Image (cartoon, rainbow, N blue to C red):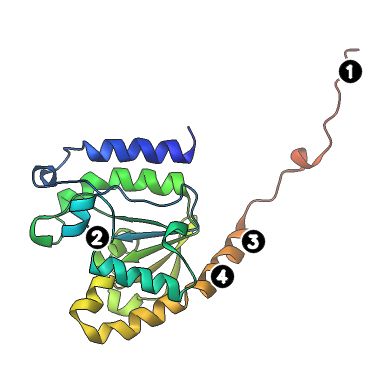
Amino acid sequence: MDSSDVLAQIDAEVSNCQACALYHSRKNAVPGEGPAKSEIMFIGEGPGFYENEQGRPFVGAAGKFLDELLAQAGLKRPEVWIGNVVKCRPPGNRDPLPEELTACDRYLERQIAAISPKIIITLGRYSMGKFMPGAKISAVHGQMRRVGDRFVIAMFHPAAALHQASLKPAIMKDFAQLPKLLEQARSALAKSAPAPSEELQEEPKQLSLF
């Protein structure tokens, strides 16, 4: 099963998921969307009103701002994968509960494994907490850290700038650094990739029957 098939299967499972109480109030689950093989994966917190209506991530005001930020970084939405740590809208846009995060994490882990991005960009403190437990977003935003086989950059959620205008310059500055950080990640991952074994480098030898 290739990455596209894996993601399609996860989408179907998420759409019918009843692993936590959020399914009672959802209109549409929001599994996430984007290329099956994307260098960059954006992970937000949870769907809002418009996302719940359309079944797509970041389509409200925060999504429009995210599109602007992507354009500033020389990226387009179809080039990146976008999703959330919880796949159904928490009532009233409240923070996701621990049991809701746990229920959705199995889907997110499978999505990460299928896409295998070079960089994961967390939008907001709940997605940041998955990769940088105990960190404060005000202290680490815009910084890139190696986490396992990839790099993670914590950023403020675009919605934060809509509610707190003072954060907008920091968010825009962080996104402006993305092209440089992606190049750094590519270079570091290329250097750390295992070299082909000597057996693979040798020409295949024909076995003698005698």
| Residue shown at the point (21%, 44%) measured from the top left | 103
Q: Amino acid at mark 4?
A: Gln
Q: Residues within 10 Å of mark 1 (few under 14, many from 20)?
A: few
Query: Mark 3 sits on what residue?
Result: 191
Q: CA distance from mark 2 to mark 4?
A: 26 Å
| Residue shown at the point (30%, 43%) measured from the top left | 106
Mark 4, secondary structure of its residue: helix
Sequence-first disc among 1 and 2? 2
Is residue 47 visible in the rendered image? The answer is no
Callouts 3 and 2 close, C-beta under 8 Å: no
Q: Residue furthest top?
A: 210
Residue 92 percent location from the top left of the image: 8, 60
Q: CA distance from mark 1 to mark 2?
A: 61 Å
Which of labels 4 and 1 is toward the front? 4
Query: Mark 2 sits on what residue?
Result: 45
Q: CA distance from mark 4 to mark 3?
A: 11 Å
Callouts 3 and 1 close, C-beta under 8 Å: no
Q: Amino acid at mark 1?
A: Ser
Mark 3, secondary structure of its residue: helix
Callouts 2 and 4 close, C-beta under 8 Å: no
| Residue shown at the point (21%, 36%) measured from the top left | 16
Query: Mark 4 sits on what residue?
Result: 184
